[in-house]
């Protein structure tokens, strides 16, 4: 196996220059090109353990995440991975599956592994041990669910504003009877989406008729069953700010013979930019998960490199709204 000195000799630079370059420091472009060429020719692979000991870092970040099977989780993890690998970092991923005991166990496990930074994705503020909050010595970033601490930054989407915009548009188009299916109010994002719905209803100058909110369990089966009941009650305007429940709602609407955008108004939440591929295209809230994961990871890498802790700041990443013709114009 080639050594750093052999790389330096072949590149015609000092071993110190090679070391600085491989550790992320800027060197002259000509030297960088020669080092890259020498590394490739010699198939040089730096000893990971030796590098970690020299830098006093594990070159890893922890990721504590609730549901690794969700579209949200996979998109965020992919964005984080794309960013941190630019800095030769790896991830250690642990799931807690909405269980408090597992959450605490896996949190402690990641700290015991001496990760250089930690992402907590869809964690719970009330579950996070106070002793952990009191002794934070690495950058910690919460994603999608804030954790109240002066040493933990948060990245969230503007779900309240997005939901309010959707429902206000429904009202503006003449809908007076409006129903919504939202997730559990134990969940931060569901709270924000319901708040947006309420703000639109309460802030409307129009005289509304029936308004109903049903709480679901995030499954398509739940969305299907609840929509069946809402249709029986006469609702023809429905907002479902959850991807899976929205899909179930669409199935129920279709089975009743309604056509979205013609005799039934509908808006939902979508992780994918695929709505224009379907007919009719659905008005939907689309979170920019790549931007959220990338921004959080870039901050993490900067804070690790500069040995800084987070400061309790909340970063809001705007959603996009795909406006289509799934909400009927009545007025």
Image (cartoon, rainbow, N blue to C red):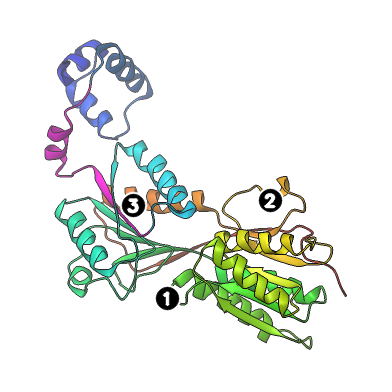
Q: Residue at x 38, y 50 (%)?
A: 297
Q: Residue 300 shows which numbered tag? A: 3
Q: Nearer the viewer, residue 71 or 245?
A: 245
Which secondary structure, mark 3?
helix
Q: Quadrant of the C terminus?
A: bottom right
Q: Which residue is mark 2?
A: 275
Ranked by sequence position, the earlier of labels 3 and 2 is 2
> How many residues crowd around disc 1 within 10 Å: few (fewer than 14), some, or many (20 or more)?
few
Q: Is residue 261 toward the left or the right of residue 192 in the image? A: right
Could you tell me residue 276's position as x and y percent?
72, 48
Ranked by sequence position, the earlier of labels 3 and 1 is 1
Q: Quadrant of the N terminus?
A: top left
Q: Is residue 92 above or below residue 181?
A: above
Mark 3 vs mark 1, CA separation in Å: 27 Å
Q: Nearer the viewer, residue 198 or 263?
A: 263
Could you tell me residue 277's position as x and y percent?
71, 45
Q: Residue 186 shows which numbered tag? A: 1
Which secondary structure, mark 1?
loop
User: Can residue 318 be seen at all in this image of the molecule?
Assistant: no
User: Can residue 56 be seen at all in this image of the molecule?
Assistant: yes
Which secondary structure, mark 2?
helix
Task: Examine the structure image and report whether residue 148 is included in the region drawn in magenta.
Answer: no
Q: Which residues are magenta?
A: 45-66
């Amino acid at each position: 196996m080639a050594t750093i000195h052999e790389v330096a000799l072949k590149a015609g630079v000092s071993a110190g220059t090679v070391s600085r370059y491989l550790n992320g420091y800027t060197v002259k472009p000509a030297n960088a090109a020669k080092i890259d060429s020498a590394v490739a020719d010699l198939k040089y692979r730096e000893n990971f353990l030796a590098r970690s000991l020299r830098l006093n870092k594990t070159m890893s970040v922890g990721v504590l995440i609730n549901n690794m099977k969700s579209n949200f989780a996979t998109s965020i993890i992919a964005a984080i991975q794309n960013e941190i690998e630019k800095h030769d970092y790896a991830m250690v991923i642990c799931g807690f599956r909405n269980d408090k005991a597992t959450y605490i166990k896996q949190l402690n496990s990641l700290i015991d592994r001496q990760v250089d930074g930690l992402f907590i994705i869809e964690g719970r503020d009330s579950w996070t041990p106070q002793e952990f909050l009191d002794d934070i010595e690495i950058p910690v970033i919460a994603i999608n669910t804030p954790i109240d601490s002066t040493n933990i930054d948060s990245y969230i989407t503007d779900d309240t504003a997005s939901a309010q915009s959707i429902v206000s548009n429904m009202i503006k188009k003449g809908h007076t009877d409006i129903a919504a299916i939202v997730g559990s109010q134990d969940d931060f994002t569901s709270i924000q989406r319901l708040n947006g719905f309420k703000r639109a209803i309460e802030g409307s100058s129009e005289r509304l008729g029936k308004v109903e909110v049903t709480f679901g369990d995030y499954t398509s089966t739940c969305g299907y069953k609840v929509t069946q009941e809402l249709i029986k009650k006469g609702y023809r305007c429905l907002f479902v700010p959850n991807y899976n429940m929205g899909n179930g709602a669409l199935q129920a609407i279709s089975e009743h013979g309604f056509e979205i955008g013609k005799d039934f108004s509908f808006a939902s939440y979508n992780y994918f930019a695929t709505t224009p591929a379907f007919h009719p295209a659905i008005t939907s809230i689309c979170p920019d998960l790549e931007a959220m994961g990338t921004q959080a990871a870039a901050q993490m890498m900067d804070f690790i490199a500069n040995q800084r802790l987070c400061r309790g700041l909340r970063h809001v990443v705007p959603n996009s709204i795909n406006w289509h013709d799934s909400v009927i114009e009545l007025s």
